[in-house]
């Protein structure tokens, strides 16, 4: 009888420890992040159509605007949403730190990343993104993409080859290209380790760009 009581006590202790170790998902914040994500993409699909020949003209015609005016129109609308989203996410950072997988589950753990990736504050929040990736609260390949963008914005070579630029050639020629990569010969090995499912060549093709190795001497 005494042995049974001891076993029961041990089991209860293990259950308590297990329950303590489990983090409760913040469902309210999760729903808020889901809503933020919808706003982040609200006009981006439309804006992406302007990169396809003829699509932008069709959209502009429906608005009785020139193509560049229609593009600016949707960019302004998305910009307003982006500003509001950034204010919200910065508040979340202040209260919780990065809202990762433990706090909001997936895919809501990626929402804050998208908001910062589409902002002008990438460099400011790189440390929090790096920690989230290292703690497995955020997929590492997303951190890698943000690192590449941060390096490109600072005028440095990127590491993983995820970023494309369309206005940075010293020659003045308008051409989209994969931003210069540090040690380009080993980039696909780094991409694989980071969790990317495509090579740099495949990713460039997905973005409508023919990949070629570029140097910093060729870009602005």
Image (cartoon, rainbow, N blue to C red):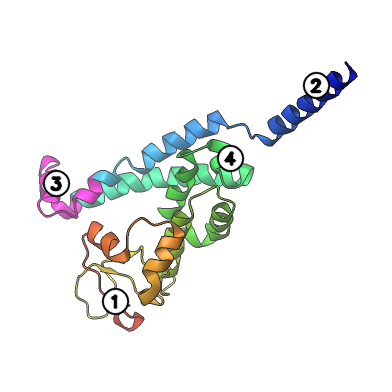
Question: Do the numbered discs 2 and 4 sit on residues whose CB atoms are within 8 Å?
Answer: no
Q: CA distance from mark 2 to mark 4?
A: 30 Å
**Residue with the mark numbered 1:** 213
Q: Position of residue 85 (x, y in %)?
A: 45, 43
Q: CA distance from mark 2 to mark 3?
A: 72 Å
**Which element is circle 4 on?**
helix
**Residue with the mark numbered 4:** 102
Q: Position of residue 59 (x, y in %)?
A: 14, 44
**Residue with the mark numbered 2:** 8
Magenta region, mostly helix, strand or loop?
Answer: helix
Front residue of 78 and 64: 78
The residue at 13%/48% (across/down) is: 55
Left or right: 77, with 140 as reference point = left
Between disc 2 and disc 1, whose residue precedes? 2
Left or right: 181, with 212 as reference point = right
Q: CA distance from mark 2 to mark 1?
A: 66 Å
Q: Position of residue 84 (x, y in %)?
A: 45, 43
The residue at 24%/49% (across/down) is: 47
Question: Do the numbered discs 1 and 4 sit on residues whose CB atoms are within 8 Å?
Answer: no
Left or right: 194, with 163 as reference point = right
**Residue with the mark numbered 3:** 60
Q: Which span of residues is magenta-colored?
A: 46-69
Front residue of 92 and 9: 9
């Amino acid at each position: 009888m005494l042995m049974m009581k001891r076993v029961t006590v041990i089991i209860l202790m293990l259950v308590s420890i297990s329950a303590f170790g489990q983090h409760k998902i913040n469902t309210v914040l999760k729903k808020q992040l889901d809503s933020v994500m919808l706003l982040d993409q609200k006009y981006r699909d439309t804006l992406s159509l302007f990169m396809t020949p003829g699509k932008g003209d069709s959209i502009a015609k429906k608005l009785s605007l020139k193509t560049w005016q229609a593009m600016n129109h949707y960019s302004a609308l998305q910009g307003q949403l982006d500003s509001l989203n950034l204010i919200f996410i910065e508040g979340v950072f202040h209260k919780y730190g990065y809202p990762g997988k433990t706090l909001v589950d997936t895919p809501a753990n990626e929402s804050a990343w998208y908001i910062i990736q589409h902002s002008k504050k990438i460099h400011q929040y790189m440390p929090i993104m790096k920690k989230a990736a290292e703690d497995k609260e955020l997929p590492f390949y997303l951190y890698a993409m943000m690192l590449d963008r941060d390096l490109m914005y600072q005028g440095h070579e990127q590491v993983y080859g995820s970023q494309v630029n369309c206005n940075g050639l010293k020659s003045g020629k308008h051409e989209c290209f994969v931003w210069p990569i540090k040690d380009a010969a080993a980039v696909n090995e780094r991409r694989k380790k980071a969790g990317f499912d495509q090579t740099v060549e495949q990713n460039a093709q997905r973005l409508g760009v023919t990949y070629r190795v570029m140097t910093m001497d060729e870009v602005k």
